[in-house]
Structures are given as structure tokens and as C-alpha cells.
Amino acid sequence: MIRKYRLGDPIETESVVCPMPVTEGLPEGLLYVSEGCFKKVLTENTRVYGLGETVRGINKRGWKYISNCTDDPVHTETKHSLYAAQNFILVWDADDAVGYYFDTPCKVEFDVGYERYDELVVRLETPDAYVYEITPDLAENESKASEADTPCRRVVRQFRHIIGRSYIPPRWAFGYGQSRWGYKSREDIENVIKGYKEADIPLDSVYLDIDYMDAFKDFTINEKTYPDFPGFVKEVKDKNIHLVPIIDAGVKIEKGYEVYEEGIEQDHFCKKEDGTPFVAAVWPGRVHFPDLLKKETREWFGEKYSFLLDKGIDGFWNDMNEPAIFYSEDGLKEAFKKIRSFEGQNLDIGTFFQFTNVVETINNNPNDYASFYHEYMGKRFRHDKLHNLYGYMMTRAAGEAFEKLSPDKRILMFSRSSYIGMHRYGGVWTGDNDSWWSHILLNIQQLPALNMCGFLYCGADTGGFSANTTEDLMLRWLTVSIFTPLFRNHSALGTRDQELYRFPHKDWMRGMVRLRYALIPYLYSEFMKAALNEDMYIQPLSFAYPEDDRACCTEDQLLVGESIMIAPVYTQNAKGRYVYLPEDMKMLRFEGDVLKEEKVLEKGDHYIDVSLKEVVVFLRKGHALPLAKPANTTAELKNDLTYICFDADPGSYDLYTDDGITPVK
């Protein structure tokens, strides 16, 4: 059952697609203590899930999370905000499960037992929102067969129903992708493809970061470093490899640049209060931001993707769309003024930090976000009141354009910043992580919450984006990433090269990627069933085993689809790990794509040895796991599958197949 409540005068976000009447009053399960502030008592056993892409565990208790899309590349446990605003929480205590969605683009603070461990406190920056309360009764759209589902899964499925079907990428987007900020030329890309081919490591895509552009301008090509770009796209596509360019939010201010000139002429850029265009800076220096909350601007900006579609491109990633701001023109002037005021002073402990703070706080400054405006649904809004919608609307612009520009073909699209609703137009990657062992665990723990919020196509930068990865870290990270829909190795300029063929044990790397390709029929099938049935592709153990306290407390093991559980090793120098089995399972030990061991293990605790070259998977009782013969691209995978079973027949597995390209209606 779902009830919709109205607080004040909410701003429509169009994140919910199912119309429903407004229930009078306030949500029964929440205490409305003051304007825009809700409270709920938490018992000792209450678990709180959701909130999408955040720091810390699957159970969100014990910390404060703030929905405020933030360009922050240092993802430590101390942070309250990352790139996303996904305001869905699920509160579960024994058989009592209830979900809440706070649909408002303003900043929202979720104090999940931070100030008081026995209280959930939700504070809205402005007391205007739609609040949806979801209880686990069967919805009209659900079959009676789902009555056996757990309360948490039913809540999630009902929520997913009202926000609409999750984005479905092309099947090739489940292959392995290589990316790096620093591929500066066609020759660099050719060398990457050559490196993977010579190492015989499967590869489906290579990503183009900002260096493919002419002076970092959106929808341009640097013809000097990427000559005959359409020919190059065709050349690599003939090898079944796809090029995936980046698109950033800021449009460079430059006379003669068509996108800039059109944006000025057709009034598509955000303005300051006095009506002049807002000037900020990102990669190309001074930019304007398209007013993507305005329908006409979304149509205009979305059509610009045709510049690359027409050259054969069939995949994109949207970046810097919180939007990130290096500085604003007005903010920079003020900063220089402050810096000059320190000249000639004796900078003591107080004034020295005041001096350094001027530069340290110039980027992504809250004052800048409060200094420009949008036209949205016929009204004028200051940006900070709609801030969390910007990345959503950028990807929506692309997704809606693809329906017109490429009606018969799926286009890969994923984004850094997001709000619920964007999940209908693209997936997400979890941004600028680090080559830290703790970030493997963070990757594991973010996946279920993203699925709850509709973001099924998701993944992290394998091996870590910032800092320098190591061979053992990369190998352990691969044992997570081979199960995530988005499987991309991405790293930052100035870090150690981390293409898989560069490592001494590249044969071990090869084996793990080959296992991924063997798993694609299963992974794609489970993804599609989750998308089409408004369900979860990855879920925590607690959702399947709610009566098992140990399972409910286990946060480093995941269920991937209906058949398997994974328990990755994420600790440096570990030779294995303890694994908790909530039921009897069959352990499958792979060395590369070769199955080395099958062994039925009883329910309970087991120490499992896992060498750096191995992947261990646990097959659930009564289920089957289909495997393909590995190939070097998804296009070369065949349908002659083998099945590993545990008290099940191969025919019991419901395999989903399609051509992987045609849009699913």
C-alpha cells in the first residue's frame, strides 16, 4: 500500500510516474515534530536501508546523511554527502517494514541514529515536499506468487513501480570497459586496444575522457589528435569495440563555438538575479551552464548528442553535473580581493588558516549555488532550491533525445550526479573513488541501496580512480566488479597505469575477465528480469533471510540475481575469509573461467581459502547457474550454455534473451 502526502507547496520533480491521490494529514508512521522535521523511534533491532549512493554500511544506522549532490572526490567515512540525492529509506523491524520517499529537490538531512541512536530524524531544508509512505501489502500490479516475498522486497518493488522502469542499456555494455583520464590521442586508444588483444583479455569498450574534445568543449572533436573520427569509430566497431565519450555540464564561453553561440541566441543558459548569464569555470575555464530544468533547453541540449551519434558513437557518460564549479567569475574576484588584504600581514595561526581558506573554499562554494537561477515549469527558482535535480535533468535531456534520435537502438548512458527519476534515463557510476582497500568494501555496500532506488545499471571505478593501485588490489576488486552491470576500469591523470595487461600476472586478470564473459548470460538475464519486474538485481542477505539474525548483520556478502551469493575478499594480504552461509550452498571455486572445485557446504560459518587468482561463488539450493563459453567481446558469445546446478534441473532456470540492442517496450 502506498500513501502520498503533501507538505506545503512542493516543487514537482517528475520522479514519480504513477498518478495517485493525496492523502489528508501526515504519514502515520512518522511524528511531525516541527516545520519540515519528522521523527521515528528506532528499536534496538531496527535496520534502516536505502539512500542510494552514500558512505558507510548497508544498514545506515549511526550516521548522518545529507542529500546534497556534491563534487567531493574524497570518499571517507566522515562525509555526509556524495554525488547523489536519493531520498528513499526503508525502515525494517522484525515483520514491520515501511518505506518513505521524500520527494523534494531541496537539501534533506537524514539523521539515522546519529544524535540519538534510537531516533530517525528527517529534516527538510524547506517544508515543501511530497512524502510517500509504502507498506509491504501486495500492490494491484503484483501477482499472488509474490506473497512469499519478504516485506523489504515488497516495499522496494512497490516503490520501484511508482517511479518507473529502470534504464536498460545495450547488452554490449555488460562487457569489460577500459578508461583513463589521459588518453590524449587516437594512437593512445589504438595502443590500449592492441594491448588487450595481445594479452587476449576480453574488451568491449574504451572510454574517452575530456582530452578527445577540442579545448574541452562539449560536442567537439580535436581533429589533430583524433583525425577522421567517424572512420576511427567504425574501425574499432568492426572489432566489436565501442568508444564511449564523456559529456560535461559546462559550455565554454567562446565566440564562434556553435553550442555557445546558439545557447546565447536561444536563451538556454542559467542567469544571475540581474538577468545576465551566470559565469562559472570547469575544465575549459569560463563556462555557462545550460538551464536543463527548462524543457526547451533539455530538447536543445539533448539534440546536441547527435553530433557524436552521427559519427557512430552509441554510448556516453555524463560528468561534472552536480554541477561542479571550480569557481565563479564573481567568486574569483572576491577571492583575489581577500587574498590581497593579507599582503604585508604577519600571518599567525589564525590569519594563516584564514588566508589558505580563501583558496580552499573557492570551488563548489555554496554562495555560487545561491547566485544563479532556473526557469522551471513556468516559474523562476534559485539554483540551490533545485540543485539536486541538475544531474537528473542533464541525463534526462540525453535519454529523451535518444528516443527520437535512435528509436531502434539502445544507447549506453550513465551519469555521476543523480536524483531518483534519473534511473529511467541512465545508470550511475559511483564517482571518484580511490585505490583503497576500504573502497572495495564501500563498493559492495553501495550496490544494494542503488538497486533499491532504481539504479540497476551501476558500478564503481574498478581498481580505484585516484591514488595508485596495486596488482593485488586490482585482482580483489575484479572479484566484485565481474558481478556489477557496469564493469569499467578507470583511473586519474598522474596515477599509475592500470590497464590489466600491464600487470605481471596479466594471465590472472585475463582469467577473471573471461569468467565475467562466461557469466554474462546469467548476469544479463537477472538484470533484465529485475528491470522488467521492478525488482532488485543485487540485494543484501537480510532481504532473502529476514529470520536469520546472522544474515541480517552480514554486510560484506551479496545476493546477485536469484541463484548466487558472493563474498569477496577485500582485506590486504588476506589469504581467504570467513563466509556465513544462511542455508546449505554449493561452493564453486573458479580459477579464471575454469571451474576447479564444486563442494556442498552446510549452513553456518566457514573459512574459505581464496588465492589472488581465484573467484569463489556460492550457488543457492534449488537453483542453476548458466555459463557461456568465454569470448573476447559480447558480440562473439554463443548461446550454447552449460549449467551448474544444486538440487535443480537446468531447465528450471528462466533464461532471458533478446538481441541486446532493440529498445524494450
Image (cartoon, rainbow, N blue to C red):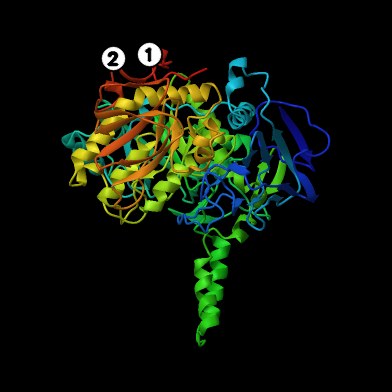
Kindly identify which residue carries mark 2: 640
Separation of residues labelled 1 and 2 (CA atoms): 16 Å
Residue farthest to the left? Answer: 198
Q: Amino acid at mark 1?
A: Asp
Residue farthest to the right? Answer: 24
Residue drawn at (52%, 17%) of the image = 665
Residue drawn at (71%, 35%) of the image = 133
Mark 1 and mark 2 lie on one chain; the one further toward the N terminus is: 2
Find residue 122 and name its label. none
Residue drawn at (75%, 40%) of the image = 29
Residue 133 placement, left or right of 255: right
**Residue 490 visible in the displayed image:** yes
Q: Residues within 10 Å of mark 2 (few under 14, many from 20)?
A: few
Residue 641 placement, left or right of 505: right
Find residue 649 and name its label. 1
Front residue of this view, candidates 327 and 525: 525
Residue 92 placement, left or right of 614: right
| Relative vertical location of residue 598 with respect to residue 408 in this rendering, above or below | below
